[in-house]
Amino acid sequence: MEKQKRFETEVIHNGYDSFKYEGSLVPPLFQTSTFTFATAEEGERRFAGESEGYIYSRLGNPTVKVLEERMAVLEKGEKALAFGSGMAAVSATLFYLTKTGDHILCSEGIYGCTFGLLQLMKEKHHINHDLISFSDEEMIRAGIQENTTCIYIETPINPTMKLVDLEMVARIAKERNIPVVVDNTFSSPYLQQPLTIGCDYVIHSATKYIGGHGDVIAGVVVGRKEELNKIAMTTLKDIGGVISPFDAWLLLRGLKTMPIRLDRHCENAKKIATQLKQHPKVEKMFFPGDPDFPQYELAQRQMKQPGGMISFEVKGTKQDAQQLLNRCQLIKIAVSLGDSETLIQHPATMTHAVVPAEERLKMGITDQLIRLSVGLEAWEDIWEDLKQALDQLPS
Ligand SMILES: Cc1ncc(COP(=O)(O)O)c(C=O)c1O
């Protein structure tokens, strides 16, 4: 077996042998929907699984395969599957792990569309869920029901930045043999590898730090081979949320610079957080790298670096929060994150607008909360823009 290299090397080389592809340095783009068989008998053998080879791009594609192999190694899993969006990855995994009458235990605070999916699963398929804070062992134990077949968490949680102690959750889940699914979008495998601390599935909206350039919508699931093979043959193949080969190719290009980009995202975020915290118009700031962050110690233990995401509450009203966004010039008003450009958004009316107001408040999403995805620009320029927008808020 080939010896694994360091993370920064694997993002560039893993899963690809140029000499199998005419020496092409970069994995070729197999932009094809189907693959031809030399004979009818060969087609029969491929469908029967008796002969190696591709059939149809919804079932597998060489460009996508390179991405999947690379992501499996980066997350330290046995196998990865790529999807056409983060939500396709989330839904394929949750539908694979549940059936009517089951229960999902979730972190109190999840991406708005994941919340929407859970509602849909409840209303249409009677798959229930509870959102709990996961802050201590007793609470988690009390939240697990007889029919809980999946624990689903984000950490850091979008957009409140609260953390969940993955080691603690994995340990409790093991006692009851319940799989733990972690949405690792905010961290990327560079900052946090949940499978290495006992979690069972990792999901990414690859749209974010994996792609990193704001030009792809995609998702990835990583885990054990046996289960991922089953997902590939059921909720991926038959529901059909596949990735396009071109998007897989773009993700491979983005991955190469992921560690360098994240170093810069994190460095910039630390500098912006230090400034934000001192600004008189900022009521509260949530950044895992801030020594006053309530879970700073956990962040230090669980994450290699604190990430590039910051949330903060402005003093004033919802209108003040919206005015702040409107006054930004360099910083773009947009949902999504992990891009080169610094992005700002208002979760209560954007990414988490589908969550009813009462639930939103329980999650910590107030009308004054703003989420910032710190980009790769010179941090001084980002801060100057944010500062002039903050300075203009009424006292
Ligand atoms: C934490 C998290 N998970 C999942 C998703 C869904 O990913 P996608 O938009 O690629 O479907 C998002 C999107 O913003 C997200 O922020």
Image: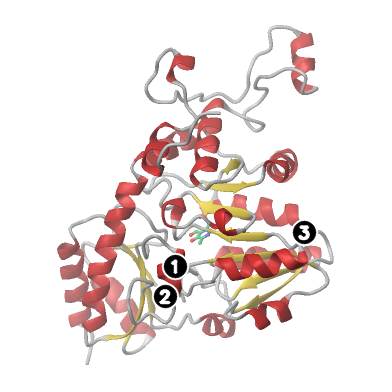
State which mark lies toward you, 3 or 2: 2
Q: Is residue 317 above or below residue 82?
A: below
Name the secondary structure under disc 2. Answer: helix
Q: Position of residue 50 (x, y in %)?
A: 77, 19
Q: Quadrant of residue 303?
A: bottom left
Question: Which of the marked residues, 3 or 2, is nearer the chain's N terminus?
Answer: 3
Name the secondary structure under disc 3. Answer: loop
- Label number found at residue 301: 1
- Identify the residue under disc 2: 297
Distance CA(mark 3)–CA(mark 2): 34 Å
Q: Residues within 10 Å of mark 2 (few under 14, many from 20)?
A: few
- Label number found at residue 4: none
- Quadrant of the snapshot with the N terminus: top right
State which mark lies toward you, 1 or 3: 1
Q: Is residue 384 above or below residue 198?
A: below
Q: Is disc 3 in contact with disc 2, using a CB cutoff of under 8 Å?
A: no
Q: Residues within 10 Å of mark 1 (few under 14, many from 20)?
A: few
Q: Is mark 3 within 8 Å of ligand 1?
A: no
- Quadrant of the snapshot with the C terminus: bottom left
Q: Position of residue 268 (x, y in %)?
A: 25, 62
Q: Residues within 10 Å of mark 3 (few under 14, many from 20)?
A: some
- Label number found at residue 98: 3
* Colour scheme of the picture: secondary structure
Q: Residue at 32% of width from left, 78% of height from top?
A: 291
Q: Does residue 119 appear in the picture of this structure?
A: no
Q: What amino acid is labelled 2 in the image?
A: Glu
Q: Is disc 1 in contact with disc 2, using a CB cutoff of under 8 Å?
A: yes
Q: Position of residue 126 (x, y in %)?
A: 81, 67
Q: What amino acid is labelled 3 in the image?
A: Thr
Q: Residue at 62% of width from left, 69% of height from top?
A: 169
